[in-house]
Amino acid sequence: MTRTNARELAVRLVFAGEGSENFWDEEYYKTLSEEDSTFKQFPDEKQAEYIKTLVCLVNEHLQEIDETINRNSKAWSTGRISSTALAVLRVAVCEMLFMEDVPKASAINAAVEISKNFDEPETVSFVNGVLGSIARSL
């Protein structure tokens, strides 16, 4: 499993919120793989730790992450951003702010690629623009 796949799983967990308690059950995970190729490989211990850390950090720093998104989204508050784009942004901003081992460019590139799986091209451009603005301000 690549780090981008792990990020996408984190995005899906952030999107799902508290409704993700079955996610770490390997049998449940297998049923998801039948519907979506993102779940074709169960995360190993290192990948699972990365995903869990990322999701926990997003939840722990949600207010600061959302404030950072709001400051850099040019008249778009988090309430106006689609749920999927917001989950992608939250994960990427979390990586940029709180995970020192993740290069900002990698977080942005992965977020743009993940966003392409869920959103229209205009939204993908929006995600890229917001994250670029945040990277320049850091």
Image (tube, helix red, strand yellow):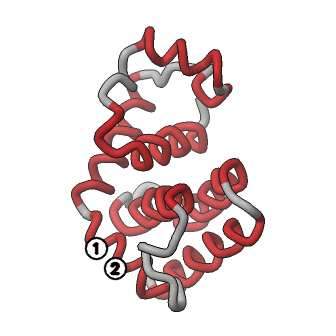
Q: Position of residue 62 (x, y in %)?
A: 29, 64
Placement of the C terminus among the 4 image quadrants: bottom left
Q: Mark 2: which amino acid? A: Glu
One can see residue 103 in this view? no
Q: Is residue 73 above or below residue 47?
A: below
The x, y position of residue 82, in whole percent, is 54, 64
Q: Look at the picture and state if 62 lies above or below 101.
A: below
Q: Nearer the viewer, residue 78 or 30?
A: 78
From the top left corner, tell me how far across and down residue 41 is, in percent: 58, 20
Residue holding disc 1: 64
Above or below, comparing residue 111 to residue 80 in the picture: above
Which residue is pictured at 60% across the width and 35% down the height? 2
Within 10 Å of the Cα at label 2, are there few (<14), some (14-19), or many (20+) other Cα atoms? Answer: few
Spatial separation of the CA atoms under disc 2 and disc 1: 5 Å
| Residue at 30% in and 28% down | 21
Q: SS for tag 1?
A: helix
User: How dense is the environment of label 1, judged by Cα within 10 Å: few (below 14), some, or many (20 and up)?
Assistant: some
**For the point 54% across and 90% down, which residue is it?**
74
Left or right for 101, reference 1: left
Q: Which mark is residue 67?
A: 2
Where is the N terminus found, in terms of image quarters? top right
Which residue is located at x 65 percent, y 72 percent?
Answer: 128
Quadrant assignment, res 115 = bottom right
Label 1 near label 2: C-beta < 8 Å?
Answer: yes
Q: Is residue 132 visible?
A: yes
Residue most extreme to the top? 27
Instruction: Determine which quarter of the picture holds residue 132.
Output: bottom right
Above or below: residue 80 compared with residue 92: below
- Element on which disc 2 rests: helix
Q: In screen coordinates, is 1 left or right of 66?
A: right
The disc labelled 1 sits on which kind of residue? Glu
Q: Residue 36 in the image: state x and y as whole percent.
A: 65, 27
